[in-house]
Image (cartoon, helix red, strand yellow):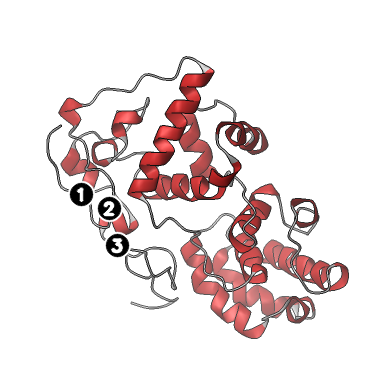
Amino acid sequence: MAKSDKEPGASGPPVLQHRQMGKAKPPQTRTGLVRQARKINRALAEVYPYAHPELDFENPFQLLVATVLSAQTTDLRVNQTTPGLFAKYPTPEDLAAANPEEVEELIRPTGFFRAKTKSIMGLAKALRDEHGGEVPGTLKDLVKLPGVGRKTANVVLGNAFGVPGITVDTHFGRLVRRWKWTDEEDPEKVEALICEIFPKSDWTMLSHRIIFHGRRICHARKPACGACPIASLCPSYGEGEIDPSRAKKLLKYEKGGFPGQRLKPPPDYPGQAAPPMGAV
């Protein structure tokens, strides 16, 4: 293997040179699929040992609201918006009793602010009236809350309660299809299939690692194949830019030397904290 430099913030295996690379063969059997998938997970664990939820939160209520607000926008924009929201409405009871127009103005930067106001105020009222002001710790109860689906519920369960779950967002779905783990498009079917491949103890961190990789390297339109540390394992290698120097320019967040999405990232995050709203 030719030697190459690791990208900024990388702690896993070195980037592989494109002239040595060919597509990994898609798994032909169920056993081959499981082996390939688990090998990719182990490699991602080396590349992203610091993978984490990219929404700032201090308690389950904050994570629940932030996850609902993250629909159709970036985690960065949510993280820049929620400090003002939680400063004014720190509890479900406070948010449930809020003036909707004031909430709309606070969350306007996240987009779809009228619908999102209805959702977060609705879930706050449900928490107040049906759960004693506490976020429930079960999938069954979470998905009954306004604006909360399986994806949001699994984010909250996995990161606020330590209950394993697979989070099938657009990045997760795209990558598992690129890796030929499934050709399903429906998030619930994808979740069920991936849950069968990995032990339950892996589910939450697997989700973080795949989402991290999708945001930083394996992009939707132009994946940075030539700068991908797990390129040798990928059956879709070559769909993106294979030249290492050009691929390197496609890297995002800490892999490209840029700030991440959290204003308050975990201590082991190797990148820069994101700037607050309005910062130059």
- Residue at the spot of label 3: 258
| Side of 26 relative to 227 (left or right) | right
Q: Which residue is mark 2?
A: 10
Label 2: how many residues lie within 10 Å, few (<14), some (14-19) or many (20+)?
Answer: many
Return the x and y of residue 156 as percentages of the image width and height: 64, 59
Residue at image coords 68%, 76%: 103
Q: Nearer the viewer, residue 61 or 32?
A: 32
Instruction: Give above or below for 58 relative to 158.
Output: below
Mark 3 vs mark 1: give the one in front: 1
The kind of secondary structure element at disc 1 is loop
275 to the left or right of 99: left
Name the quadrant containing residue 118. bottom right
**Residue 277 image offset from top left, x and y in percent:** 45, 76
Which is more N-terminal, label 3 or label 2?
Answer: 2
| Residue in view at x 78 percent, y 79 percent | 93
What's the residue at 63%, 71% (across, down)? 62
Read off the residue under disc 1: 6
For badge 3, the amino acid type reads Phe
Q: Residues within 10 Å of mark 1 (few under 14, many from 20)?
A: some
